[in-house]
Image (spheres, rainbow, N blue to C red):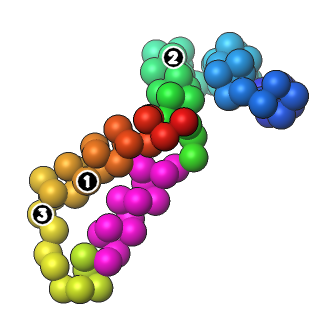
Amino acid sequence: PAGLNAFGTCSSSATIPISLKCATEKIGIPEEITSLTLPLGTTIDMDAVSILMSLMITFFATALGIDLSIGTMVTVLACNVLLSIGIK
C-alpha cells in the first residue's frame, strides 16, 4: 500500500502514515523504531546519496593508498548525510 501511494502521489512524505502502519502492524517492527527511522529516511530523501558518496570516498582513498581513520570516516558520513538532506 505504501508503494502504491508513493507512486500515485509522487511524494515520499505523503506515505509516512501508511508506511508506519505497515511496518508496525504487518511486519511487527516496534513503533519506537519506526517512528524514528521512517521519517528520517524520508528527510534524507531515501536516495542513498550519503551512503554512496561515503563509499566512493572510502574506495578512492583506499585505491590511492590513503589510510582513513574511523573519525575521518564518521566525519565524511555525517557531512554526506547533511548534504543529502539539502539536495532536495
Q: Residue 81 placed where, x, y %?
A: 37, 42
Report which residue position mark 3 lands on: 69
State which mark lies toward you, 2 or 3. Answer: 3
Is residue 85 in sight in this rendering?
yes
Which one is earlier in the sequence, the residue at label 3 or at label 1? 3
Label 2 to label 1: alpha-carbon separation: 26 Å
Q: Main secondary structure of the magenta part?
A: helix
Q: Residue 27 placed where, x, y %?
A: 68, 28
Report which residue position mark 1 lands on: 76
Estimate how packed mark 3 is, as few (under 14), some (14 to 19) or many (20 or more) residues with alpha carbons within 10 Å: few
Label 3 to label 1: alpha-carbon separation: 11 Å
Q: Nearer the viewer, residue 80 or 67?
A: 80
Q: Is residue 38 above or below residue 75?
A: above
Label 2 to label 3: alpha-carbon separation: 32 Å
Instruction: Tell whether 79 sits left or right of 36.
Output: left
Report which residue position mark 2 lands on: 35
Magenta stretch in the rendered image: 48-60
Q: Is residue 14 above or below residue 84?
A: above
The quadrant holding residue 73 is bottom left
Estimate how packed mark 2 is, as few (under 14), some (14 to 19) or many (20 or more) residues with alpha carbons within 10 Å: some
What kind of residue is marked 3? Ser
The quadrant holding residue 62 is bottom left
Which secondary structure lies at badge 1? Answer: helix
Q: Is residue 50 magenta?
A: yes
Name the residue located 51 percent from the left edge and 17 percent from the top edge: 35
* Image quadrant in which the C terminus is located: top right
Q: Residue 60 placed where, x, y %?
A: 32, 77
Q: Is residue 70 above or below residue 2?
A: below
State which mark lies toward you, 3 or 1. Answer: 1
What kind of residue is marked 1? Val
